[in-house]
Image (cartoon, grey):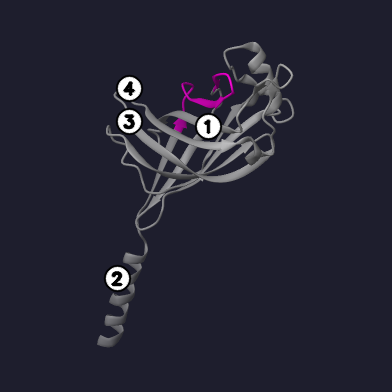
Amino acid sequence: MRRTIVLLVILLLCGSFGNAPVLLHRLIVQPESTLVIAGKTNVNSFQCTTLYCGSDTLVLRESAGTRPVFLKGNVSLDASAFSCGMQVMTNDFSKTIKAKQHPAIAIDFISFERTPVFGCAEERFKGRMNIALAGITKTFDVDCSIEAKNNGLIYLRGSRVFSFADFNLTAPSRMMGMVKVEDNLEVKFNLALKLDPNL
């Protein structure tokens, strides 16, 4: 009898330690969010920006002892809404990324290196994500930072250098080839997020 009770206690203790608490963070993407693609030519530099106009919500699952993962991590942006400052450059950029054939650029968050504190101090860490551009989806580790502001918003930022070739694209050139765009591009996202108070 005593042996049976001891076994039951051990099983209960093992069960309690095995079930680590799970927390979910629901983060609503706000309209202030932007995606910037910056590059250089042999003459100058350029920057193309698109604004967010969707209704996405990120759901981050946090469990002790494991990397936080996203149960829902997709953010979709309008590829045809990029502005590069000059209409000629905007038109060329739109053709280059095949905006008509593939109207959405998607960032699908997979996991974070660690769970953010969501505090006022800026935190830096790696984030793993899928990026879909021009019909090609690739997985990358991206340098990220997160910072909470007094206005109640949380800013999730990230940047990484890609090449046109990463997405099977060819860098555009104009003026009979005299202006050439370098193959490397820096993709920068700045997501304004709001914690869902109803969770």
**Residue 78 x %, y %:** 62, 25
In which image quadrant can residue 171 be found? top right
| 134 part of magenta stretch | no
Q: Are marks 3 and 1 in contact (CB under 8 Å)?
A: no
Q: Amino acid at mark 3?
A: Ala
| Quarter of the figure with the N terminus | bottom left
Between the residue at mark 2 and the residue at mark 4, the CA separation in whole angstroms equals: 44 Å
| Quarter of the figure with the C terminus | top left
Residue at numbered disc 1 = 187
In the image, is residue 81 above or below residue 15?
Answer: above
**Nearest to the observer: residue 145 or residue 71:** 145
Can I make out residue 190 in this image?
Answer: yes
Residue at numbered disc 3 = 148
Name the chief secondary structure element in magenta: strand
Badge nearest the viewer, 1 or 2: 1
Q: Tag 3, which secondary structure?
A: strand
Between the residue at mark 3 and the residue at mark 1, the CA separation in whole angstroms equals: 22 Å
Residue at numbered disc 4 = 151
Q: Which residues are magenta?
A: 28-50
Residue at numbered disc 2 = 13
Between the residue at mark 2 and the residue at mark 3, the CA separation in whole angstroms equals: 38 Å
